[in-house]
Image (spheres, grey):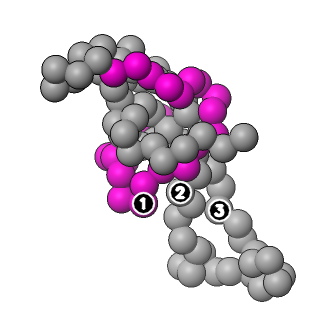
Amino acid sequence: MKIRPLGDRVVIKRLEAEETTKSGIVLPGAAKEKPQQAEVIAVGPGGVVNDKEIKMEVKVGDKVLFSKYAGNEVKIDSEEYIILRQDDILGVLE
């Protein structure tokens, strides 16, 4: 199944969390924080939202940093995704 976001929405998939700290300590599953980095899976067309022209600045495949509590989590074909507005993306990682 494919998902096509509408308006200024973006579909992202979280990148895997680090399992060890920089000092080499292995973290159990419960202690790991969900990462705020993700890969863009799909991008809406943009358009006019609240009388403002929205130009989409991210593209499929970009690695992005997003707000901690942004968007809505959805599960499609046993994969977890987040659908959020482009405004909730803080930046593109290069």
Q: Is 16 one of the magenta-colored residues?
A: no
* Amino acid type, mark 3: Ala
Q: Residue 14 placed where, x, y %?
A: 56, 49
Front position in the image: 1 or 55: 55
Residue drawn at x 65%, y 62% is 17
Element class at badge 2: loop
Position of the C terminus, as image quadrant, is top right
Residue 2, numbered label = none
Q: Quadrant of residue 64?
A: top right
Q: Rate crowding at label 2 as few (under 14), some (14 to 19) or many (20 or more) other CA atoms within 10 Å.
A: some
Residue 5 vertical placement versus 25 (above, below): above
Residue drawn at x 40%, y 19% is 55
Residue drawn at x 24%, y 16% is 48
Q: Quadrant of residue 21?
A: bottom right
* Amino acid type, mark 1: Lys
Q: Which span is picked out in magenta?
A: 54-80
* Amino acid type, mark 2: Gln
Tell me: 6 left or right of 29: left
Q: Nearer the viewer, mark 3 or mark 1?
A: 1
Residue that badge 2 annotates:
36
Q: Nearer the viewer, mark 3 or mark 2?
A: 2
Residue that badge 1 annotates:
68
Q: Earlier in the sequence, mark 1 or mark 2?
A: 2
Residue 17, numbered label = 3
Q: Residue 87 placed where, x, y %?
A: 37, 39
Specify whether residue 78 is in view.
no
Gap between marks 1 and 2, in whole Å? 6 Å
Residue 33 vertical placement versus 80 (above, below): below
Check if mark 1's residue and mark 2's residue have beta carbons within 8 Å. Answer: yes
Q: Residue 65 placed where, x, y %?
A: 55, 49
Tell me: 39 left or right of 53: right
Specify whether residue 19 is in view.
yes
